[in-house]
Amino acid sequence: MKSESPITASNSHEGTPLLDLRGMVKSYPGCLANDQVDLTLMPGQIHALLGENGAGKSTLVKMIYGVLRADQGDIEWQGAPVTINNPSVARGLGIAMVFQHFSLFESLTVSENIALGLGDSSGVNTDSLDEDIVTISARYGLPLDPERYVYTLSVGERQRIEIVRCLLQNPKLLIMDEPTSVLTPQEVDTLFKTLRQLSSEGVAILYISHKLDEIKALCHHATILRGGRVVGIANPATESASSLASMMIGQDVTPHRLPESAGFGPVSLACQSLTLPAADSFSVKLDDINLSVRAGEILGIAGVAGNGQDELINALSGEILLSSADMVQFKGQPVGRLMPGSRRQIGLCVVPEERLGHAAVPGMSLAENAFLTGAQRLSLSRVGFIRHRASRQFASRVIDAFQVQCRGSAAAADSLSGGNLQKFVVGREIMQKPEVLVVAQPTWGVDAGAAAAIHDALLGLAADGAAVIIVSQDLDELLGVCHSIMAICAGKTSDVFPAKHITMEEIGLLMGGAALDGLQATDGVVNGQESARKFGPEAPL
C-alpha cells in the first residue's frame, strides 16, 4: 500500500454491504475524533480497524454500537439507511460488541451475568437460558457451565461469557475490541477457530487489535485510521506487520533488538519465600514465591490475569505489608514492612495495571498526577508545599518524551485516551530513573509506535543499570524485551528461563501451571550467581 490515499484491496465478499458508513464525523472540544470516515463491511468478512492511539477507532465503533451519536454522516444497514440512537437499537439490528474490559459481577453465576447483559429487548427466552448457553457454547467451542460463579473462572473463560452472550442474540455483526490482550496462546487459537466459524456462517466481524501478526493471520481486510481520517485500506495477508505499523503511524517502524548482555550487576530486588494469604474470596493466595532480578536485567513474569499478579505487585510496591520484612529485599536490605512512599524514595518504583483510578487520579491534572509519585524522588515539594511549576515542568517533559497526545500538563487524566494515559504513566516512572522498576502491562492498549518507544525506554533504563520486572500477558512483548522469563499460576511461580531459549508455546504451558521437561532453567538465587539445571518432575525444588 502506498502513501495517504485509500486504495481498494481485493474482496472476495460480494453483494450488498452489511454495514456502510459514509462521511462519519464526531468532534469533542479541541479534538476532531472522526473526520469524514467511510467504512464498508460485507457479510462474513473479518475486517480489522487499525490505528495508533487517538486515531479514532473507539469513537467510530461506539457510533456503530449506539454509545455515541455522530455529528454528521450516514449509516446504511443491509442497504437501508438507519439511525442508531443507543445500544438497544444496535442489538435490534443484529450488532453485538465484546468490550476490552469485561462488565461481569463476580458473585453471580455465568447464567445470571448473561441474563443481566441481554436485557428485556434481546428476544432470548430466559426460561431456557441455561440450556441455550450450553448449546451455543458447545457449537462454537466455548465451553461454559451456566452454574459456575464468575469469580472461579479464568480470564479466558470470562471472555467466553461475553462472546456467548453476544452469540445468543444471533448477531450479524460482532465488534471485538482487543479480544486477545488477556489470553494465552492456546486460548487465542480457540478464539480464532470460533471467529473463523462465525465468518463461514456469514457473521461479519469488526476486529480491533494492536497485535499485527494476529491481524495478518485472521483478517480479510483492514481499514487504517490516522488522526481521525481513513488513510488506507489493505489486505493484511499481503502486508507485513512492519508495513501495517508504518501505515498506522505514517513512518517506518524500526524494531529494536535486545542487546546481548555483557553480564548483570548484583541483585537489586529479591523475594524470599514470599507468602501472602488471600485477603478475601476473590483474591489469590501467594505461595512461597522466590525470585531475583539483577542490575541491568529485565525479568518478565507471564500469566493469565487473576493468578496473583496484582497481589505480587502490591506486595512489591508496599500497598500490602508482609508479615516478615525479609520476604522482599531491596539491594540486600529487608523492605517488606516499608510503606510505598519509603520504597519509592529509596528507588523502587511501580506501575500498576489499572491506569485510571490506581496509576492516575481521574479528575486530577497530569501535573498533579506527576507530583503524586514524583514528590519525593524529584523534590517536587518544599517544607510541605507543592512546587507547582516544577511539577508542571516534569509533566511536560514526560509528555514531550513519550509523545502523549493531550492538551498539556493541565489536562485531566480522564480526558486522555487509554493508550495516551498509559504512555504518560509509564513515562512518569521511567523518567524518575528508579533503581528498580516493576511495571504491569506496559504497552496494554497502545499502538505499535508507542509500544516501541516504551520498550526502548525500558531497555535504556536497564542499560543504565536499573533492574526491571515486567508483568505482562503479551508474550510477544516478553520475548522481545526480556532477558529472563518466568510464569505465575494460581499464586505460584515457575522457574526462570532465558528468554532466548523458550518459545511462546512453552510460556503458555507455564502460564497454565505445567512443567517443562528438558528445558534449561536459570536457577536464580539471591546472591546473583547463575546456574542452569533441568526443570521437570524429578528436578529438586
Image: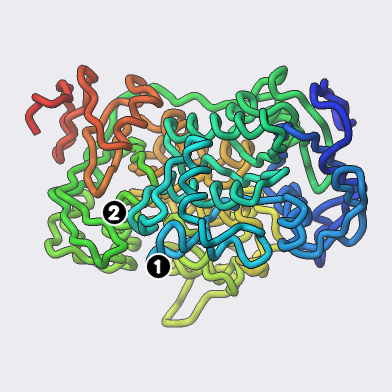
Q: Which residue is mark 2?
A: 312
**Three-letter code for the amino acid on which mark 2 is drawn:** Leu
Q: Residue at x 34, y 61 (%)?
A: 344
Is there CB contact under 8 Å for labels 1 and 2?
no
**Quadrant of res 238:** top right
- Checking the image for residue 64, the label placed there is none
**Three-letter code for the amino acid on which mark 1 is drawn:** Gln
Residue 417 at least partly seen: yes
Nearer to me, 512 or 453:
512
Left or right of 355 on screen, residue 494: left
- Above or below: residue 282 compared with residue 252: below
Locate the C terminus by quadrant. Answer: top left
Mark 2, secondary structure of its residue: helix
Q: Residue at x 89, y 48 (%)?
A: 76
Left or right of 499 on screen, residue 81: right
Q: Residue at x 23, y 41 (%)?
A: 493
Mark 1, secondary structure of its residue: loop
Nearer to me, 487 or 256:
487
- Above or below: residue 166 compared with residue 377: above
Across and down, in percent, residue 120 comes to 64, 67
Across and down, in percent, residue 309 comes to 33, 51
